[in-house]
Image (cartoon, grey):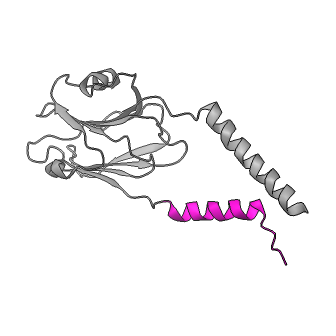
Amino acid sequence: MVKVFKPIFFLSFCMLLFAGLTPNAEALTIDATNLSAWTYDTNYWTGNDPNNPNADDVEEIVTYGGDLTLLYKDDFDDGESGTYTLSYDTVYEDDTDDPNNATISYVSGDTISEYPLYLIVKDGNHTPTWYIFDISSWNGEDAIELLNFWNDGGGAISHVAIVGGVAPVPEPATMLLLGTGLVGLAGFSRKKFKK
């Protein structure tokens, strides 16, 4: 007796396998006292000029040839701004008015999927005035933990911001090829097992 193998079972199996291989969410931790251990992406920058870098400044600092835009920003004193304001929340973990630790968490809604991505951590007037981290590999859902920023110099985190490029959009040809392949697979199995 020949067992009939239906494409729907095969697709279901593949989806379950993929779901099982998807990594669990973990926090992306950046400890300012141990930046030599920064391995998430290899690049980070520090500096004092300009005093308050925006997306255009980040383009020059990291020598990115495209356009970057503000996606999310949280000022310690002034609240949130940016395209993804409703999707993320930042909690400053110190009990003082001069926080050295913060956590950016995904709350709900759309996730940041733009590429590349850069995280700005800004102080008021201490040296360095800012840090910029390449977080292009971040999945948009893991929490970002910032630890020990300006701990030893009397400074504090004044704001955090994420800037990024254009969101990746699948090319129509790629989607057409995938759709054609799935339709072909379904048609082939029907024809083969209908006999």
| Identity of the residue drawn at 71% across and 42% down | 179
Q: Is residue 116 above or below residue 90?
A: above
Q: Which residue ends up furthest to the right in the rendered image? A: 195
Q: Residue at x 13, y 34 (%)?
A: 128
Q: Quadrant of residue 20?
A: bottom right
Left or right of residue 81, residue 35 in this image: left
Task: Give the vertical position of 167 relative to 25 (above or below).
Answer: above
**From this viewpoint, is residue 181 visible?**
yes
Drawn side of residue 138 relative to residue 96, left or right: right
Horizontal and vertical percent position of residue 22 = 50, 59
Query: Does residue 148 show up magenta in the picture?
Result: no
Q: Position of residue 76 (x, y in %)?
A: 30, 38
Q: Residue at x 86, y 56 (%)?
A: 191
* Nearer to us in this view, 151 or 120: 120
Residue 40 versus residue 124 in the image, above or below = below
Which quadrant is home to the N terminus?
bottom right
Q: Which range of residues does the magenta coloring cover?
A: 1-22
Q: Is residue 170 left or right of residue 126?
A: right
Q: Nearer the viewer, residue 106 or 164?
A: 164
Q: Main secondary structure of the magenta part?
A: helix
At which x and y percent is residue 137?
38, 45
Q: Point out residue 156 in the picture as x, y percentages from the top left corner.
A: 18, 41
